[in-house]
Image: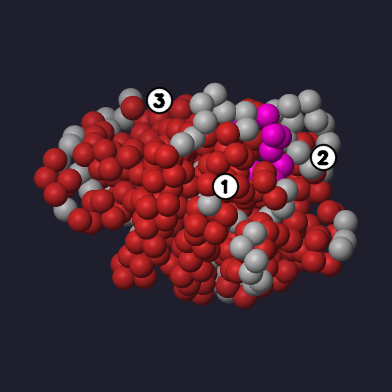
Amino acid sequence: MKNVKTNTFNSRIGFILASVGSAIGMGNIWMFPYRLGQNGGAAFLIPYFLFVALFGYVGLSGEFALGRLTGTGPVGSYDYAMKSRGKRGGKILGAIPLLGSFGIAIGYSVIVGWVLRSIFGSATNAINTAGSEAYFAQATKTLGSVPWHLIVILLTAFILMRGVTRGIEKINKIMMPAFFVLFFIIAVRVAFLSGSAEGYKYLFIPDWSALLKVNTWVMAMGQAFFSLSITGSGMIIYGSYLGKSENIIHSSLMTAALDTCSALLAGLAIIPAVFAFGMDPTSGPPLMFITLPKVFAQIPLGRVIAVLFFVSCLFAGITSLMNMFEVCAEAVGKMLRVKRNTSVAIVSAIIFGVGLFIEAESRLGSWMDAITIYVVPFGALLGAVMIYWVLGKREIHPELNLGAAKPVGKFFEFVSKYIYVILAVVVFILGILYGGIG
């Protein structure tokens, strides 16, 4: 693309890296390796790859296409879809996935604040001096991470105020390659640790019997669905900044592939190190903020490795937050009819203000559970229905075919309407029954 306006992506790689940045998050780092090991090792990768391919091919491409078709975020896009059927209420429906992105941004900014604090704690050795449990407890008490939390929000807002091309695209072109390089360095270092072989066995020796277990398929589906940032919201706004000549299907599959590589790389960097020192690869924040600092403390040049690890996590967190803030800021800007910088400032202030009340770990956990189990999956389901049932092939297929090497046809229509949408319903229901699967 040759358009250099601040409200469009200036290159295909910039768009893909921005999408990958949105998709790569803490779930790739602290959840995927654990689920891989606990659900059959290499055997888990079979259903996971299948679901990633399906959701990338149909789910991501649909959200990108809807955004490019309408040139706006979920509120305007859902309104367009409903009006195409002569119906009203699209703006209200579009507000649901928007609230999902808003809710995640509130909690996620607190977590990324913990990451930023851990960078400085690793660099100064404060984590080891205080002990990782105590250091983490200090950050996760009421108002325990205010300055770090604020810095993360100000940094995200500053990037967004520079626009899509000079802000989102440019920063992702730096942060995403750096993320992969840093994690690769850590993975190589970890490979030389005595006892790391047990970690590789945990990750990659297949237990084929796991494929006969329902839970394996459920967890693979949930991990794939949410890892790709399919929310009915954020990827729509990125699609709205995409030029008409770009191949959406190709970009979607590239995004899915790179996101999967990031998850595997995280597993190679984390799990062998944990096993090398006989620690428990527990999922969730304790693995990242308590267990791993203990591991790094026992490795030669461990402080350097710890800093590199948390910097790479910061990059993953900031690039995800950029997408969440962006979709909210676009909606506020159009609703209040204010300039971009003003809308970004408003969104940032609200996210910080609400986030102050949930900085305590117990409150944050309850908040994120409510958003990720109920609001976000329902928003993703709404998006799937809007794209493939309300708009349907008459509008979406021509958009997908723009810039495509090969047009989509009956196979895509069947998979999108009768497999993907049904699976979106299943993800929503199972998420509630299981108390979260992504």
Q: Nearer the viewer, mark 3 or mark 1?
A: 1
Circle 3 packing at 10 Å, graded few (<14), some (14-19), many (20+), is few
Circle number at residue 188: 3
Task: Give the camera-side residue of 183 and 298.
Answer: 183
Q: Nearer the viewer, mark 3 or mark 2?
A: 2
Q: Earlier in the sequence, mark 1 or mark 2?
A: 2
Q: Earlier in the sequence, mark 3 or mark 1?
A: 3
Circle 2 packing at 10 Å, graded few (<14), some (14-19), many (20+), is some
**What residue sits 68% from the left and 59% below the top?**
80
Q: Quadrant of residue 311?
A: top right
Q: Which residue is mark 2?
A: 6
The stretch of residues the image draws in magenta is: 238-247
Residue 124 visible, this orientation: no
Name the amino acid type tagged 1: Arg
State left or right for residue 223 relative to residue 60: left
Q: Estimate the x, y position of residue 109 in percent, counting from the top left.
A: 62, 58
Task: Give the camera-side residue of 273 and 436.
Answer: 436
Q: Secondary structure at mark 3?
A: helix
Task: Give the camera-side residue of 213 and 236.
Answer: 236
Name the amino acid type tagged 3: Val
State left or right for residue 76 relative to residue 381: right
**What residue sits 28% from the left and 39% below the top?**
45
Q: Is residue 239 magenta?
A: yes
Q: Quadrant of residue 177?
A: top right
Alpha carbon separation for disc pair 3 and 1:
50 Å
Q: Which residue is mark 1?
A: 394
